Image: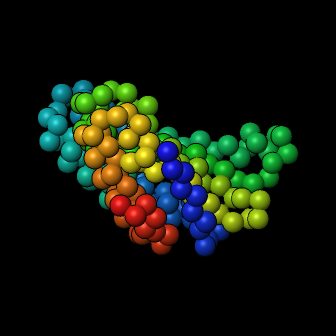
């Protein structure tokens, strides 16, 4: 796999705010409602599109800063699980093991020189490891969606897809 390590020309907190604005949290209330009412997949697609203006949503956020500070580390670091289950379904149908890598993992941190870094494993290179061309194709699509998100955030494109 190919790890992308992108140095951002912004403070950690400023970029974190921009990122979280562009990639909102999953609307769990709405998704639960759709699941409980056995809504159609088309209804789910519409709800996801409304929730994710730049394709992706945050499924989980783990701020490791407080825990790592106990070991003497003073640099901020936040991990995110970012994805889109409508896109993930297109891989799941071929191999449920695709969910080992979906949602995507991101680390946003400050490096030793004080630079803000956005790190992610390039989706196409991760999903190619499953050995299914249909899944790899979706990984390539995710590369393009990631590039579009990063361009929106002023730091891309980077994957070349």
Front residue of this view, candidates 44 and 127: 127
Q: How is the image coloured?
A: rainbow
Say if 81 sits above or below 37 in the image: below
Q: Which residue is drawn at 43% across and 60% down?
A: 159
Q: Residue at x 34, y 58 (%)?
A: 145
Give the residue at the far right of this rendering: 72
Can residue 106 be seen at all in this image of the molecule? yes
Q: Residue 87, located in which quarter of the rendered image?
A: top left
Q: Residue at x 32, y 43 (%)?
A: 136
Residue 78 location in percent, x, y?
A: 61, 48
Say if 10 sits above or below 131 in the image: below
Q: How many labels does the image show?
A: 0
Left or right for 35, reference 97: left
Front residue of this view, candidates 64 and 136: 136
Q: Residue 127, located in which quarter of the rendered image?
A: top left
Left or right for 51, reference 2: left
Residue 110 location in percent, x, y?
A: 69, 58
Say if 84 sits above or below 36 in the image: below
Left or right for 34, reference 21: left
Residue 146 location in percent, x, y?
A: 40, 57
Can residue 54 be seen at all in this image of the molecule? no
User: Which quadrant would the C terminus be assigned to in this image?
Assistant: bottom left
Residue 12 location in percent, x, y?
A: 64, 63
Front residue of this view, candidates 43 and 143: 143
Q: Which residue is drawn at 18% across and 27% down?
A: 38
């Amino acid at each position: 796999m190919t790890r992308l390590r992108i140095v951002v020309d912004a403070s950690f907190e400023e970029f974190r705010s921009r990122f979280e604005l562009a990639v909102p949290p999953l609307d769990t209330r709405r998704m639960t409602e759709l699941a409980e009412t056995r809504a159609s997949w088309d209804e789910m697609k519409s709800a996801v599109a409304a929730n994710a203006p730049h394709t992706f949503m945050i499924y989980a956020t783990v701020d490791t800063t407080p825990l790592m500070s106990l070991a003497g580390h003073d640099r901020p670091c936040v991990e995110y699980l970012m994805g889109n289950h409508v896109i993930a379904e297109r891989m799941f149908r071929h191999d449920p093991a695709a969910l080992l890598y979906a949602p995507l993992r991101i680390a946003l941190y400050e490096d030793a020189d004080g630079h803000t870094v956005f790190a992610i494993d390039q989706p196409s290179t991760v999903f190619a490891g499953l050995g299914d061309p249909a899944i790899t194709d979706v990984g390539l699509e995710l590369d393009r969606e990631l590039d579009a998100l990063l361009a929106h955030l002023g730091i891309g494109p980077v994957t070349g897809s």
